[in-house]
Amino acid sequence: MKIILTKDYQDMSRKAANIISAQVILKPDSVLGLATGATPVGIYRQLADWYRKGDLDFSCATTVNLDEYYGLSPEDEQSYHYFMEKHFFSKVNLRPEKHFLPDGTNPDGDAECARYEAQIDSLGGIDLQLLGLGHNGHIGFNEPSDAFAGSVHLVDLAGRTIEANKRFFPSAAAVPRQAYTMGVRTILRAKKILLAVSGEDKAQALYQTVKGAICPKVPASVLQLHPDVVVVADEAAAHKLAGGSF
Ligand code: F6R
């Protein structure tokens, strides 16, 4: 793993955006795997800014998102469809028919998982996957468990994840209990992975991800097995690490 240490959230966002930007410049028809949550908001803001200034062109790119809440429609303000539209899709020139997310409204879990996995395969896989890190070490919604889940699946959200995500909902009770998510195998098949991490509250999870044993109780630790992972972390998140390459 390559660790890039940054000063703060803004610096982390800029450096991570630089890596995505380089990917799109080098390969304009890249398939970008995207994440939601608080961490990537600054990255999307920076990318949109460079697009506005004429430095970036997303017209040939395709995007696939990690996850979506079960039961939420794209019009729901708490859905990840809505988040992506608000923070990124509406701000750049990605073609609407070329961004993909799991369909939270499909009640048939097996069918939706198979459909979304096939969708990703049909695009030829992911060139660069952006990830955030959960407090419990989750990536996508791959929650701590006894075994790594392989492909796209419907997952029961952990209590800690519901707690962490209630800030986006009127109350914890309003947070959906399930979500569709890419599995660990889907994520590991990406050619390159960019893990963005900010804040002291992620320091322990980041330490376990980078330095801990590879184990499904800390799903992100599996990233140690991938040959091309870049972690961009701010000082607060990285203070338990020594720095440099791991
Ligand atoms: C979001 C996702 C999650 C988040 C993680 C961190 O698509 O897959 O794994 O990346 O929960 O969330 P934030 O950035 O809000 O701390």
Image (cartoon, rainbow, N blue to C red):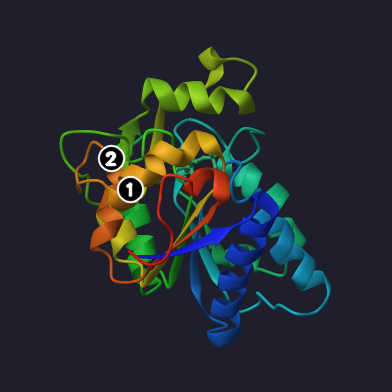
For residue 144, which quarter of the picture?
A: top left
Closer to viewer: mark 1 or mark 2: 1
* Residue at the right extreme of this rendering: 53
Q: 39 left or right of 214?
A: right
Q: Is the shortest distance between ligand 1 and the CB of mark 2 under 8 Å?
A: no
* Residue at the left extreme of this rendering: 146
Residue 185 vertical position relative to residue 227 in the rendered view, above or below: above
**How many labels were placed on the picture?**
2
Q: Nearer the viewer, residue 39 or 141?
A: 39
Q: Who's the residue at 29% across and 66% down the image?
A: 189
What x and y, as percent, mark residue 232? 51, 59
The disc placed on residue 209 is 1
Give amino acid for label 1: Thr
Q: Earlier in the sequence, mark 1 or mark 2?
A: 1
Residue 190 vertical position relative to residue 169 in the rendered view, above or below: below
**Quarter occupied by the C terminus:** bottom left
Q: Nearer the viewer, residue 152 or 147?
A: 147
Residue carrying label 2: 218
How would you rate the neighbour count of disc 1 (Cα within 10 Å): few for under 14, some for 14-19, many for 20 or more?
many
What x and y, as percent, mark residue 73? 57, 36
For residue 180, which quarter of the picture?
A: top left
Please say whether residue 36 is visible from this viewpoint.
no
What x and y, as percent, mark residue 167? 62, 25
Q: 25 left or right of 152?
A: right
**Quarter occupied by the N terminus:** bottom left
Q: Secondary structure at mark 2?
A: loop
Q: Who's the residue at 58% across and 37% down the image?
A: 79
Q: Nearer the viewer, residue 97 or 43?
A: 43
Q: Are marks 1 and 2 in contact (CB under 8 Å)?
A: yes
Give amino acid for label 2: Val
Q: Secondary structure at mark 1?
A: helix
